[in-house]
Image (cartoon, helix red, strand yellow):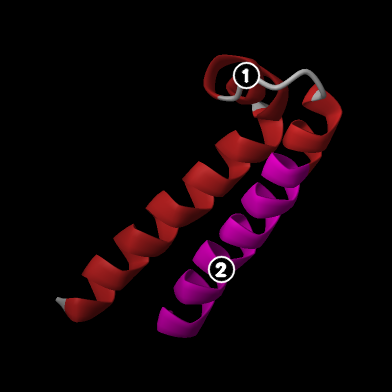
Amino acid sequence: MEKIILIMIGLIIATIGVMCVFDARIITKKIFGFGDQNEGSAGLKIFGFLFSIAGTLIIYFNI
């Protein structure tokens, strides 16, 4: 049962990370109000990449 819960948590984390990478520009426009969107979207893409790697590692080490 714990394995299934950890796999689901890993899937959710990986999905959030992928959404951050692909929708970084849109999320930056909605959430942040500063003028330079390139820095915000680059930071969000890096965060999303690391988040998706963490989620997939959780899945990998649970299977």
Where does residue 42 sit, x and y in percent of width and height? Answer: 80, 40
The Cα atoms of the two marked residues, 1 and 2, are separated by 28 Å
Q: Does the magenta stretch include residue 11?
A: no
Q: What element carries label 1?
A: loop
Quadrant of res 18: top right
Task: Indicate whether residue 46 is drawn in magenta.
Answer: yes
* Residue 24 position within the rendered picture, expressed as x and y whole percent measured from the top left: 68, 29
Which is more foreground, mark 1 or mark 2?
1
Determine the secondary structure under disc 2: helix
* Vertical side of 13 occupied by 27: above or below: above
Q: Which residue is drawn at 59% across and 56% down?
A: 52
Question: What residue is drawn where x is 27% and y is 77%?
Answer: 3
Q: Is the magenta stretch mostly helix, strand or loop?
A: helix
Camera-nearest residue between 36 and 29: 36
How busy is the neighbourhood of tag 1: few (under 14 within 10 Å), some, or many (20 plus)?
Answer: few
**Which quadrant is the C terminus positioned in?**
bottom left
Front residue of 14 and 48: 48
Query: Mark number for residue 33?
Result: 1
